[in-house]
Structures are given as structure tokens and as C-alpha cells.
Amino acid sequence: MSRTRQYHKQQAKAIQRRRHTATERLQRDRRQAQQTAEALQQALNDLGLPEDLVTEIEGRLRSQQKLLGKIVGGDVSTAVRVPYQHRAVPGARLG
């Protein structure tokens, strides 16, 4: 039986990758990462979301938590907890 066309393509790409030196691979990976970051930034800009979306949502959740605590008359922080996660790039991870 002959191998599938996809398998042969994968093998050819693997051979080509092995031929590249470590610096060439690093440069290629950096270019790909830069292009991906630019595409993600463009997609976020197209959506029109604020840059500090994560911070804004965390703030809103905290204020809702405080309001709920006032309504119930107790501390709800043990039942409803908003974890604080420090992110170097706010809004970089959605979903």
C-alpha cells in the first residue's frame, strides 16, 4: 500500500526542518510568533474591545461581589471568589 499524500508532505517538511540550523529555526519561529501576535492584535482591534478588558471585568466582578455582600449582610468572599491573576499583557487571552 502506498502512503497517503499528506504523510509524504509531512515527511518532506520534516526533512526540510532538520536541514535548517538552530539559528535559522529560531529566526523562523520568531517571525511566525511576530506574525501571529500582529494577527491577534488586528483581530482584537477589529472587535473594538478595550485593551484593559480583563482588568475591567475583574473590577466589575469585585464590585458585584461587594454589592451582594451588602445585600446578604455578610461576607460572601468565601462563597463567591474572584481570583486575582496578574497578567503581563491585559486582554491578551480571551476565552
Image: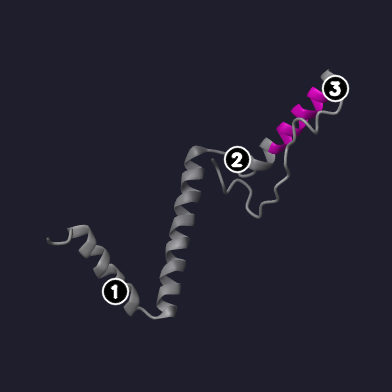
Residue 26 horizontal/vertical position (percent): 45, 73
Which disc number belongs to residue 50? 2
Apparent side of residue 56 relative to residue 40 in the rendered image (left or right): right
Location of mark 1 (residue): 16
Labels 2 & 1 near each other (Cβ < 8 A) = no
Amino acid type assigned to the residue bearing label 3 in the image: Lys
Amino acid type assigned to the residue bearing label 2 in the image: Pro
State the CA–CA distance, disc 2 to disc 1.
42 Å
The answer to which image quadrant residue 4 occupies is: bottom left
* SS category of the residue bearing label 1: helix
The answer to which image quadrant residue 76 occupies is: top right
Eyeballing the image, is 53 above or below 40? above
Q: Around disc 1, counting alpha carbons within 10 Å, would you say few (fewer than 14), some (14 to 19), or many (20 or more)?
A: few
Q: Main secondary structure of the magenta part?
A: helix
Eyeballing the image, is 78 above or below 55? above
Q: Earlier in the sequence, mark 3 or mark 2?
A: 2
State the CA–CA distance, disc 1 to disc 3.
64 Å
Q: Earlier in the sequence, mark 2 or mark 1?
A: 1
Residue 43 horizontal/vertical position (percent): 46, 45
- Mark toward the viewer: 3 or 2: 3
Front residue (pair 49, 95): 95
Location of mark 3 (residue): 70
Who's the residue at 21% across and 64% down the image?
8
